[in-house]
């Protein structure tokens, strides 16, 4: 379905981003990966799906590096047709103890990076009359939780950015939507489970059950594969008139 298209997925060396990149590659899209850590493993996983894959290591907190990544993607594959703004980090602390540099980093990586990548991707999408921008927000783009001020502010912000991007392009073939996952068992959440286990003197398994029971009525983690399937839907012809939604896949978290 996406043969000949190019998808750039930020923060795709791990977790949800890698899951979405694989789902889009399975539909035939060439992929530009981004993120830190192991690169060769994810590159090989994508290449095995029979599409072209490239990597750019832009630090998404740095606008100049984002500009360089967007130029690189255009030079490699002609243009970016599908942009998935996914890179994100977390830090957990009460507001009065929240490190200022963590606030700045979370706002830069989880929110401002999406603005920069979007502003740079839009002109080519508008010129060809087709494009998909998918912002990986969070259920924390819809509701709050204590000790996550920067994350919740950034994720509510990206839901707002999604709506404006969708509206400014509403009469064109360029759509923008947000995905709002609940708990997904990735390194970002594993760190929170480890901290919970250490603080409560409980096993990792017990900490993970507590985490789900607190917030997620299904008592199940959402998977990167399920999120990838939602991204594919947004890119499909059936997604043509889905514009500006914040679609939660959260086991009922936000329904409470
Ligand atoms: P993860 O830690 O597995 O992956 C994060 C990715 O972002 C990695 O590839 C990492 O290298 C990259 N990254 C981090 N800082 C970066 C930077 N400065 N520049 C470039 N890349 C950077 O986490 P994940 O759980 O897969 O999270 C992906 C997205 O999903 C995030 O935006 C996160 O907020 C969101 N999300 C996660 C969950 C969850 O439960 N895991 C729930 C809702 C939303």
Image: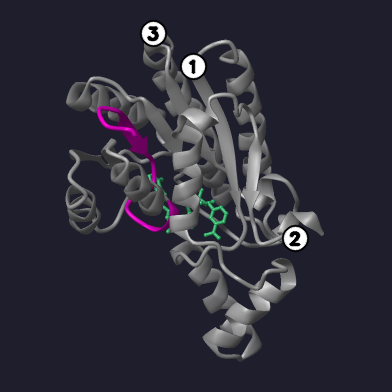
Nearest to N terminus: mark 3 or mark 2: 3
Q: Is residue 196 left or right of residue 224?
A: right
Is 35 or 142 nearer to us in this picture?
Answer: 142
Query: In the figure, 130 relative to 44: above or below?
Result: above
Which structural element holds mark 1?
loop
Percent position of residue 251, x then y = 66, 62
Which image quarter: residue 95? bottom right
Alpha carbon separation for disc pair 1 and 2: 39 Å
Nearest to N terminus: mark 1 or mark 3: 3
Callout 1: few (<14), some (14-19), or many (20+) C-alpha neighbours within 10 Å? some
According to the picture, the residue beneath numbered tag 1 turns out to be 173
Which structural element holds mark 2?
loop
**Residue drawn at 43 percent across, 22 percent down:** 131
Q: Is residue 12 visible?
A: no
According to the picture, the residue beneath numbered tag 2 turns out to be 146
Callout 3: few (<14), some (14-19), or many (20+) C-alpha neighbours within 10 Å? few
Query: In the figure, 36 relative to 2: above or below?
Result: below
Alpha carbon separation for disc pair 3 and 2: 43 Å
Question: Mark number for residue 127?
Answer: 3
In reply to whether residue 28 is colored magenta, the answer given is no
In reply to whether residue 6 is colored magenta, the answer given is yes
> Which of labels 3 and 2 is toward the front?
3
Nearest to N terminus: mark 1 or mark 2: 2
């Amino acid at each position: 379905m996406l043969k000949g298209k190019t998808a750039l997925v930020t923060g795709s060396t791990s977790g949800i981003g890698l899951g979405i990149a694989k789902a889009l590659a399975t539909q035939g899209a060439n992929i530009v990966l981004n993120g830190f850590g192991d690169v060769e493993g994810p590159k090989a996983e994508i290449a095995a799906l029979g599409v072209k894959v490239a990597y750019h290591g832009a630090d998404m907190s740095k606008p100049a590096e984002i500009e360089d990544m967007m130029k690189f993607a255009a030079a490699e594959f002609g243009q970016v047709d599908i942009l998935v703004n996914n890179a994100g980090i977390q830090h957990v602390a009460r507001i009065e103890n929240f490190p200022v540099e963590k606030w700045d980093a979370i706002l830069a990586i989880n929110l401002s990076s999406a603005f920069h990548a979007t502003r740079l991707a839009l002109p080519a999408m508008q010129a060809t009359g087709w494009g998909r921008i998918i912002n990986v927000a969070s259920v924390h783009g819809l509701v709050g939780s204590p000790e996550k001020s920067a994350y919740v502010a950034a994720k509510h912000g990206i839901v707002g950015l999604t709506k404006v991007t969708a509206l400014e392009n509403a009469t064109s073939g360029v759509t923008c939507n947000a995905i709002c996952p609940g708990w997904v068992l990735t390194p970002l959440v594993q760190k929170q489970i480890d901290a919970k286990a250490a603080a409560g003197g409980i096993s990792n398994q017990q900490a993970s059950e507590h985490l789900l029971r607190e917030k997620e009525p299904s008592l199940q983690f959402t998977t990167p594969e399920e999120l990838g399937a939602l991204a594919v839907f947004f890119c499909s012809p059936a997604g043509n008139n889905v514009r500006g939604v914040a679609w939660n896949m959260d086991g009922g978290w936000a329904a409470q």
